[in-house]
Amino acid sequence: MDLTAALENLVPALETGLAEVSSLARLEDIQVAFLGRKGALARLMSRLPELPAAERPAFGRAANAVKERLAALLEDARLRLGREQEAADLARFDPSLPGRLPWQGSLHPITLVMEEISDVFQAMGFEIASGPEVETDFHNFEALNFPPDHPARDMQDTLFVAEGVVLRTHTSPIQVRAMLERKGPPVAIIAPGKVYRRDSDLTHTPMFHQIEGLLVDSRVTLAELRGVLTMFVRQLFGRDIAVRFRPSFFPFTEPSVEADISCILCAGTGRAQNSPCRVCKGTGWLEILGAGMVHPNVFSAVGFNPETCSGFAFGLGVERVAMLKYGIGDLRMFFENDLRFLAQFS
Ligand code: PHE
């Protein structure tokens, strides 16, 4: 083919090629094939010496015009592909959709309940106290009037760490530490924390949470215990809740009581939906905490004078309160860390 015809053929050839191109990568290839250093146009130019000298300037001008035309066609195609790409992206992406907020954490329901209970007591003048979870036998048992072979130790299902060292089985050792620290009355503390016992089933986990309270002064009586705990229960569960105290036993309190509140589900009637209430098992009452007047032997163990000091102490299970408060039926939910459960408390 003669050179000029071949030159003029480049434009329609490129047009045909561009009509089919659908990606920018392919467009690059085409550009190299036509305008590259070893492309079609360059190959034609290299054959310039084949022409008679008189025709060479005209051919050069024609080649330049073709080159510009090719470049313009390629640029058009590049713009078209860019627009097509953008349209395809927009088709997959809906810019009118609301944005997705990042996950935000929230406090665990157990923490929420511990904070709420602590707040109620802090408002009454109690201070927050704490102690170690790995405790000595002295703080966990001995000073709390559990003598070495006292059968009450069996109530506690202790996890031992070493001889004379245990994972605390209750928050009551914090009473002992608080009194040892303050050396004399008054003491008014509230102490939330983890405790450990050697049982694990549907209603028990080896670790759970308690809140301990202790008030010691010179003329504290069971009346103050009842007054403070009744006020606390009503603040937490509502003013219509009834509270009753039953005699009980703890080695570190005398007399000892357990406090019940009227059932949250059946309002104390014992019946819900025409059958015995499943939350209180038809009794109308829910056990909520253990309490009592501090035993004189506990005062002696921490160097307080049992003749002049009096006080009350109480301990309550946080999981139980949280289950009642939020209507949670299964204790294990607190420890499974299922975000669908936890996110409800944010
Ligand atoms: N420590 C007791 C328990 O774990 C609860 C309690 C605390 C009872 C303080 C009386 C006074 O069961």
Image: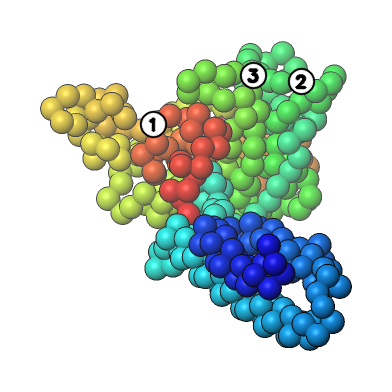
State the mark number for residue 160.
2
N-terminal label among 2 and 1:
2
Q: Picture coordinates of residue 17 (x, y %)?
A: 57, 60
Q: What element carries label 3?
A: loop
Q: Closest to the observer: 221 or 319?
A: 319
Q: What element carries label 2?
A: strand
Q: Can residue 318 be seen in this view?
A: yes
| Residue annotated with mark 3 | 198
Q: How far apart are marks 2 and 1 (CA)?
A: 31 Å
Disc nearest the viewer among 1 and 3: 1
Q: Residues within 10 Å of mark 3 (few under 14, many from 20)?
A: some
| Residue annotated with mark 1 | 329
Asked if 334 appears above or below 248 in the picture, the reply is: below
Q: Residues within 10 Å of mark 1 (few under 14, many from 20)?
A: few
Q: Distance between the residues labelled 1 and 3?
A: 22 Å
- Residue at 77% x, 82% y: name it: 55
N-terminal label among 1 and 3:
3
N-terminal label among 2 and 3:
2
Q: Distance between the residues labelled 2 and 3?
A: 10 Å
Q: Is residue 120 visible?
A: no
Q: Disc 3 residue type?
A: Arg
In the orientation shown, which residue stands out farthest toward the left?
Answer: 274
Q: Disc 2 residue type?
A: Phe
Q: Picture coordinates of residue 40 (x, y %)?
A: 73, 64
